Amino acid sequence: MRTFELTRATSVEEALDALTAGAQAIAGGTELLNWLKEGIEAPARLVDINRLPLDRIEFADDRVRLGALCRMSDVAAHPELTREFPVLVQSLLRAASPQLRNMATLGGNLMQRTRCPYFRADTGLPCNKRVPGSGCSARHGDTTSAAILGWSDDCVATHPSDLAVALAALDAVVVVRGPEGERRIPATSFHRLPGDEPARHNDLRPDELITAIEVPRGGKRFSHYLKVRERVSYEFAVVSAAAVVEWDGETITRARVALGGVAHRPYRMELVGVPMSRLAEAVRLTRARPLPGNEYKVTLAERAAVRAIKEAMS
Amino acid sequence: MKALTRLDGPAKLTGAARYAADAAAPGTLIAALVPATVPTGRVTSIDTSQVVDATVLTHHDLPRLTPLPSPPLGHSVLPLQDDLVHYEGQPVVMVLADSWQQAREAARQVRVTYDDVRPPLLFGQAEDVVPRSDHLLGEADESTGDLQAGLAAADRIVEATYTTANRHHNPMEPWAVLAEWVDDELVLHASVQAAALTQAVVAELFGLPADAVRVICPFTGGGFGSKGYVWPALPLAAAAARATGQPVKLVLTRAEMFTLSGHQPATRQTITLGATADGRLTAIRHLSSNAAARVDDYAENTTHGTTWLYASPAIHTEMRVQRVDRPQPTPMRAPHEGPGIFPLESAMDELAHELGIDPVELRIRNEPAADPMTGRPFSSRKLVECLREGARRFGWSERDPEPRSMRDGHDLVGWGVAAATMDTFRAPSAARVRVDAAGRVTVETGAQEIGTGLPAMVQAVAAETLGCDAESVQVRHGDPDFPGHGGTMGSMSAMGLGSAVQAAAREVLDKLGANPGDPLADALAAAGLPELTAEGRWAPESSLAAGRSADHSIHTYGAIFVEVRVDEDLGLLRMSRAVGRYAAGRILNPLAAHSQMTGGLVWGYGQAVLEHSVFEPVLGRFLSKNLAGYVVPVNADIRELDVAFVPDDDRLASLVGAKGIGELGAVGVAAAIANAVFHATGRRVRDLPIKIADLL
């Protein structure tokens, strides 16, 4: 581990100045510290943003605003959020472990990078996400956990966040601040598909900070987050499905479904006017391109989508 | 006997227990290793120009060590002795600095180039060969009766090929060593499973008299086989300390534990069973091959259990290895029968289904009167009792044999059974009992406490023999000045150390002319003694490898019953309950033994459903050298467990009547789960671990 300079910001402006000067932000540290230890990142400057006033949960008529520094465990334990947004709370409770959730923040959760084993290897294997231009070891290696949608020859990684999948189904917005003011990025496009620039993990610029996540309210909606994994707890998803459903008793009038574990961003589907009998057809992943060894993920993701919708309605 | 809580519990819970990495010496240098990034080849250059504040040691700098075979070395290839790379992860440079952080960073700045790098030869691509090493216990091929005649006489034959995965031990504590040369004596604070063996091997490596090496190890933070033999961390730390003249501390990283302390190698096994219509076996054939590093021929001995588990007029087994490019394997809980019983017990279930005979009944019908391969009498064998008692406890008689006959919501429910058995390895042990004028008893042993609760077992045996209160017995362990112990591995400790403690305690009574229960203070006073010490020794009578008996068939047994649930849509497999009944000689501390078997069931669940170390075929390395990529069970995976022992006492196995239990608990679980999966789904899964993709 290399030495680095750590400063503490007490205001958003101060933090943004530090970012502009080349620092990286650190909050809960549950992911950045791993990268430091594994040699994936070696920043010269870190700015601790834990003291910024970004840890509030605010209810407006049309939306809930979640501060970027809210801890996962605090959001997961919030009674009103539990009632109104089961999918959100379930996605948090099924993530990581209680110890990690006590430290990790919502903003930091979105800043995770992939769990691709080649990216996280003990020695720097060729990985375009880790070192641009070095190649993708996974493309022709072990692809069991790789993407089935939206991958490129330069990168087949998936994004690991459970929260991001729930937010995508909820039509949430990621609010960011930079030197030029505020930007609002839909949760469905915050993370980037690799294309030929896999090292651009998301849409956040180096001099920007996530300040909040906004979740729209309203309507009679039912939701559920389903996480499929071989270990019951403390494991990343093989695939996951977040469903937010409106229905009239027979037909799904509208459902927004996001799939996790299938691409480097949540894969969003929208169902309108689908009778229950045609549900399986409606979620078919016709554009899926599985890699050798992960064909099963196509079937699994489709079934997870159906199950999540049904669970939301039950 | 009485259930005793762990003597070592409070020290561990409060952090007072001292582990190897806690040891300190003035002027200690902290070591970090640079691993080879290629699976084969030769080091051509080492660029250290970017290294600051650290000392770099290469194969040019370290003393040459005496070559030794594996075993007793983990791997006969000792790193940093020449420029050859035998496996990815092999240390090619060692860096020493004042802090761990400096050493790691310096190691990262070393640039190594390689030549003669070939694509790795993988398991499945190499030839099956007869292993030539001491890793093979006995003959590679074992045979009795006429196999072809047995198959010809069969009304039904089942034959299938099974695979088991590469697995890693992953003890919580990695290899940790503090090596210090004091004059010509080498002092090692080391995390090992066999301090006495370590002492002897390190002395040979450095050309020292055995008593010039001291291995101090009161506590080891888990081993599961990965610290049984002598692996590179020890000689590297000692050699670096010699080269620099300063104490050197080396603590392996989690990633280094994946290449420098062994693994259970992948196996491929084919079982053929022939049987009459009424379920009498007429022939058993078991062919097995495992992955082995190119040198050393590590043999997993998967076929052994097949030679004694069931009666059959013809049994034929073959044990092979493939010499491939990979780090060296080693025994891992449970070795041999762990991977070996999975195919046999899966095949027995398949046969039961084909014949329409209950799988418990099929096993009981093939209970042998004597060891079917050797004809030796069994020392004690209570498999049938385990099967009957387990079935009763589980409610097995309620089972509808039809696959897919039970459902609960999204889940298909299935019940499965398997037998478990484990070989009995034995090693000499010794212990000393001290009694002071006040009658206080202290037992001293060189053995280390590795997480099994060994000190409480020592208390139990000493107290029973002397007729005193167990809690009043003090136990001191892990010091090289105490009598040596054969190793806390191979499920040998209760037998060896328990017997030695019993012998020492009896010697105390003999010397005093006292009977069990007599007040010792009074006896000492009557004899005019201020204190008394007595040493007890025990050794197996056998000359066979690993102390196995040449006169009796000595093994442990068990029966595992499980209920699984399989979500048919999502391919999710969960074990909702398990019952294990075991026969393993006399149980010296029921509480610790219960914990051992509980842990064994969890470990077996890991083998069945989760544990799989991916060997990357292009790079020729283990892909995920961390606990996020190598998944073991967590509490949430485990529901109802019910384990117990049937009464057993085996004085042919050991003086104290005990046999081994540690490894037995992990055997048979995977087969019981796979058999339950078949009962639930109608799908026979023959490759471990059973994955979502297998069940969709």
Image: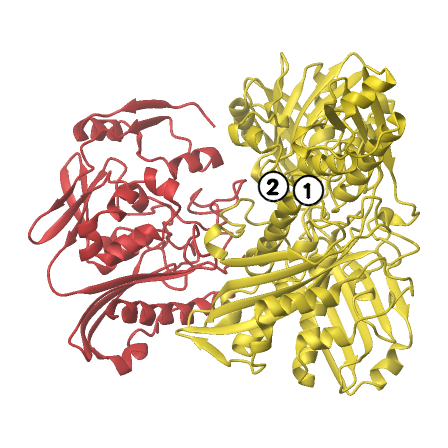
Chain colours: A red, B yellow
Residue A44, x across and y down, in percent: 37, 26
Disc on res. B192:
none
Given the image, what chain letter belongs to the residue carrying mark 2?
Answer: B
Measured along the vertical axis of the image, is residue B566 above or below residue B205? below
The residue under the point 8% across, 54% down is A62
Q: Amino acid at mark 1?
A: Ser
* Residue marked by disc 2: B171
Q: Residues within 10 Å of mark 1 (few under 14, many from 20)?
A: many
Residue A165 seen in the figure: yes
Q: Residue furthest left?
A: A61
Residue B683, x across and y down, in percent: 56, 76
Q: Amino acid at mark 2?
A: Pro
Q: Can you say which quadrant of the picture contains the C terminus of chain A?
A: bottom left
Closer to the camera, B103 or B628? B628
Image quadrant where residue B664 sits: bottom right
Disc on res. B226:
1
Number of dots carrying numbers: 2
Q: Looking at the picture, do discs 1 and 2 lie on one chain? A: yes
Residue B502 relative to residue A170: left or right:
right
